């Protein structure tokens, strides 16, 4: 097990930022860490990387107790903090050389990292001359210089343009092949594109910890059906396997069914038998966006 967080709680004075959070992660997993602003994501990441201490609980990274032995633990952890703090007056290679000298890392590693994050053509530029996307690459290069097996990335894609987003996501996915990655984001599609697993926290409480595959294979499905005129609620409730339904005061109903089978033919037959005309009939996957809104609303 690469990461093991057990019942971690953190108070800032009287404010509870984390309330008994537990999760663990295996090698090679990329975990999306989601939650509204102020949920406690950055706090959890600072604790995981040994920069601040929790009031209660235990954190083990690669068999090292992070709270008791942060320096030892940091040898196998790469961390890209929120807002990516860089010395922007420095040149890319110079900055990475500086980082490597502080952490006593062989110079040969610098070139490997520059190549890995796609900075070869930018290595002789000043950091402040680079676009935000390339600055993120510098932060990522600095985070992986010591070849850590665990990577903690705090909102690594915030503020990037759509092309940069795709590039940095691909890079995270590539880096995640042989590392455990925990990264926070507000973009649901990002988690669906990059992660194997999602953890959602809110107000310091862990609400969801699910593999993405399990999320997709749930038994619930939402069917969106539009009739040619307004239908009474009692009508909808007579459909089989219905869990819930809602409409926005028009002729379109959002009906959630508990069923593994596609319920569209049932809805169609039901409408036909009752002399109703259907103008539209679609399934809507219960995706991460819906789940996030449901649990954090
Ligand atoms: P997130 O990263 O999910 O936005 P944070 O971990 O930054 O959440 O914050 C969690 C809660 O703790 C917030 O209510 C925030 O205001 C509070 N908080 C964070 N850092 C400090 C601090 N240094 N002192 C006091 N309160 C803090």
Image: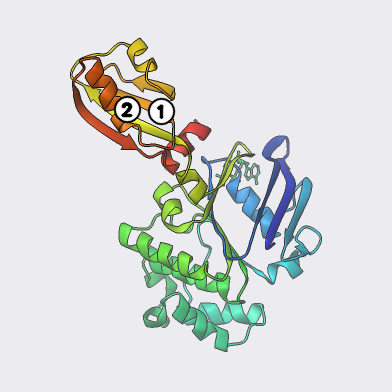
Seen at 25% across and 20% down, the residue is 271
Q: Which residue is mark 2?
A: 266
User: If the picture is divided into quarters, which one holds ligand 1?
Assistant: top right
Q: CA distance from mark 1 to mark 2?
A: 13 Å
Query: In which quadrant of the rendered view does residue 81 lie?
Result: bottom right
**Residue pictured at 74% horizontal, 49% vertical:** 6
Which residue ends up furthest to the bottom in the rendered image? 108
**How dense is the environment of label 1, judged by Cα within 10 Å: few (below 14), some, or many (20 and up)?**
many
Is any atom of residue 236 visible in this view?
Answer: yes
Residue 80 is at least partly visible in this image: no
Expressed as whole percent of the image width and height from the top left, the position of residue 179 reads: 58, 68
Specify few, some or many for label 2: CA neighbours under 10 Å numbering under 14, 14-19, or 20 or more: few
Residue 274: percent from left, percent from top: 25, 14
Choose the circle earlier in sequence order: 1 or 2: 1
Q: Quadrant of residue 61?
A: bottom right
Q: Secondary structure at mark 2?
A: helix
């Amino acid at each position: 097990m690469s990461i093991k967080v057990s019942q971690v709680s953190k108070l800032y004075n009287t404010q509870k930022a984390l309330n008994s959070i537990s999760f663990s992660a295996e090698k090679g997993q990329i975990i999306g860490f989601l939650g509204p602003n102020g949920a406690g994501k950055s706090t959890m990441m600072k604790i995981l990387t040994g920069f601040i201490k929790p009031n209660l609980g235990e954190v083990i990274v690669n068999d090292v107790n992070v709270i008791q032995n942060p320096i030892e633990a940091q040898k196998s952890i790469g961390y890209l903090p929120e807002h990516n703090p860089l010395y922007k007056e420095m040149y890319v290679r110079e900055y990475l050389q500086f980082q490597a000298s502080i952490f006593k890392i062989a110079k040969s590693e610098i070139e490997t990292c520059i190549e890995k994050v796609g900075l070869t053509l930018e290595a002789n530029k000043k950091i402040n001359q680079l676009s935000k996307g390339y600055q993120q690459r510098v932060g990522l290069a600095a985070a992986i210089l010591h070849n850590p097996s665990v990577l903690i990335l705090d909102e690594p894609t915030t503020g990037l343009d759509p092309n940069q987003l795709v590039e940095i996501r691909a890079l995270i996915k590539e880096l995640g092949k042989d590392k455990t990655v925990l990264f926070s984001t507000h973009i649901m599609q990002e988690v669906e594109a990059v992660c194997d697993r999602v953890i959602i926290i809110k107000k310091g409480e862990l609400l969801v910890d699910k593999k993405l595959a399990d999320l997709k294979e749930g038994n619930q499905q939402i069917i969106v059906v539009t009739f040619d005129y307004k239908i009474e609620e009692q009508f909808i409730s007579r459909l089989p396997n219905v869990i819930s339904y809602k409409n926005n005061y028009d002729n379109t109903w959002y009906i959630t069914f508990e069923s593994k089978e596609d319920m569209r033919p049932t809805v169609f037959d039901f409408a036909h038998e009752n002399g109703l005309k259907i103008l539209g009939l679609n399934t809507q996957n219960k995706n991460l966006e819906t789940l996030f809104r449901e649990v954090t609303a």
